[in-house]
Amino acid sequence: MVLAAYHRFPLPAMSRIHITDIEAAINHWRERAPSCDGVVLAPELRALAEVYGRMVFARSDEIDEERLSHRAMSAWLDWYRTTPDTPCIAICSTSQGDSWCKGCGRSFAEVQHWLAMSPADKRAVWRRITREGQALRFTRYTERAR
């Protein structure tokens, strides 16, 4: 289920949530709402655990955000709000005409449309630039990225 506050725009289809983000959201909720008896889980944890279990069973590392229940998506978004929003480190080479930013690693379109992107789309970009690790945010200016 996609929340109405986030609209689509013409970029590559990325509205999928990676299993590592589901795991991070589960850990966020385990810390935020620990089980009082070691058995009963908070509703948010149950919703995320169901998604995680389906992904593991299907051997899938991504899931369409539309396939998350409202409760699972809300729990995931609660975790998402604790993450840094933008990879920008204020060294933007797209403003100089580059198609890929040397500072953060995003494409010109990603930089241009960042504010309109959904949380799942933003996390997909974060995963890609982190995996590539070529941008200055990951090499020369790691202290600035903090």
Image (cartoon, rainbow, N blue to C red):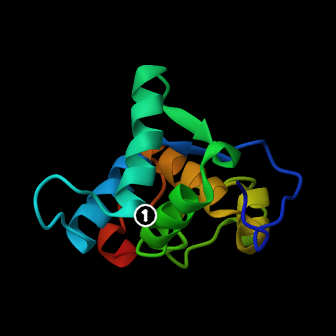
Which corner quadrant of the image does residue 31 belong to? bottom left
- Tell me residue 127's x, y (percent): 49, 48
| Residue at 69 percent of width and 63 percent of height | 118
Residue 64 is situated, as x and y percent measured from the top left of the image, at 65, 40
Left or right relative to 66: residue 33: left
| Residue at horizontal 68 percent and vertical 53 percent from the top | 100
Placement of the N terminus among the 4 image quadrants: bottom right
Question: Of all residues shown, which one is farthest toward the right?
Answer: 10
The quadrant where residue 30 appears: bottom left
The image shows residue 131, relative to residue 136, as above or below, that is: above
Q: Which of 141 and 146 is in front in this view?
A: 146
Point out residue 55 in the picture as x, y percentages from the top left corner: 47, 30
- Residue 4 drawn at (x, y percent): 79, 69
Residue 108 visible (yes or no): yes
Amino acid at the residue labelled 1: Arg
Badge 1, how many Cα within 10 Å: few under 14, some, many 20+? many
Q: Split into 4 quadrants, where in the image is the C terminus?
A: bottom left
Q: Name the residue under label 1.
A: 137
Q: What residue do we see at 43% from left, 41% from top?
A: 50
Residue ID at (74%, 72%): 95
Q: How many marks?
A: 1
Above-or-below relation of 106 to 103 = above
Residue 96 seen: no
